[in-house]
Amino acid sequence: QSALTQPPSASGSPGQPVIISCTGTSSDVGAYNYVSWYQQHPGKAPKLIFYEVTKRPSGVPDRFSGSKSGNTASLTVSGLQAEDEADYYCSSSAGSNIVVFGGGTKVTVL
Amino acid sequence: EVQLEESGGGLVQPGRSLRLSCAASGFTFDEYAIHWVRQAPGKGLEWVSGISWGSGSTAYADSVKGRFTVSRDNAKNSLYLQMNSLRPEDTAFYYCVKVGAVASKYNLYFQHWGQGTLVTVSS
């Protein structure tokens, strides 16, 4: 049950793209197409923004996209907006009823 | 509307026990796995434990295995986390989270979150 690896920070100017990587192993990210992403603003509970790698819940802007290749998943924000400044966490299934999270990435809008 | 409300947090001395509860509403409780996720102040998310829809399957993070026990009462739409032998590193907000997929042990995305209850382990 080792944590998934995310960069601690990412930044960009409004309108610029930002990509956050999430690297796991063949026992979690590589084993299942069950990667999720969460957005957390300060003082708030996390919010699901992606599930099953590429699926967006209703209400999540389409400037967000998800992908996966091998043991690495990625979250892309195609055009940053001020409200996108938040912490982002990836997670993956790692067995029956077992989940592993990434360490989180703080996104700053310059 | 799905609602998850945690309770039972508080200040506890190292080595003591605490029981968290989560009251659920707005969905068919016995069709979904429910999990606990914690977040130490200023830190990242950590998965703690999960239980399948019929209580037949449970799982724990290595950091709490043997000390924490998850259970559910489908008749009361409630989830519990019995925490024994608490350590200072268990200090965190504990979130009750509902899995989005019906009756799934592997497709474990957390669609709904409670507001969390703070557990502080300190002498």
Image: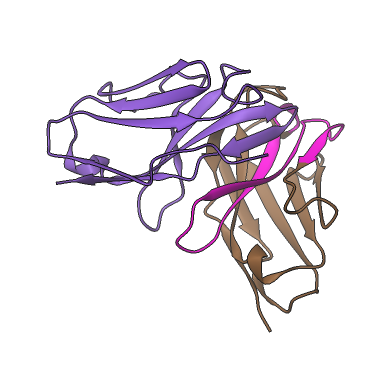
Chain colours: A purple, B brown
Name the foreground residue: B63 vs B60.
B63
State the quadrant of the C terminus of chain B.
Answer: bottom right
Residue, x 62% and y 66% (percent of image)? B91
Question: Could one spot residue A41 in this view of the protein?
Answer: yes
The residue most toward the bottom is B123
Total count of labels: 0
Identify whether A65 is placed above or below A88. Answer: above
- In the image, taking residue A109 as reference, residue A107 lies left or right, namely right
Image height of B85 relative to B50, above or below: below
Residue A10: x, y in percent?
A: 28, 41
The spot of residue A2 in percent (x, y) is: 63, 40
B20 or B5, which is in the foreground? B20
Q: Quadrant of residue B57?
A: top right
Write the start and end of the magenta stretch as one range: B30-59
* Residue B43 shown in magenta: yes
Image: B49 above or below A80 = below
Residue A109 lies in the magenta-colored region? no
Q: Quadrant of residue B35?
A: top right
Residue at 54% across, 34% down: A91
- Where is residue B10 drawn, in percent x and y? 65, 72
Q: Where's residue A4, x and y in %? A: 54, 37
* Residue found 80% across the figure and 50% down from its top: B65
Can residue A59 be seen by looking at this rendering?
no
Q: Nearer the viewer, residue A48 or A7?
A: A7
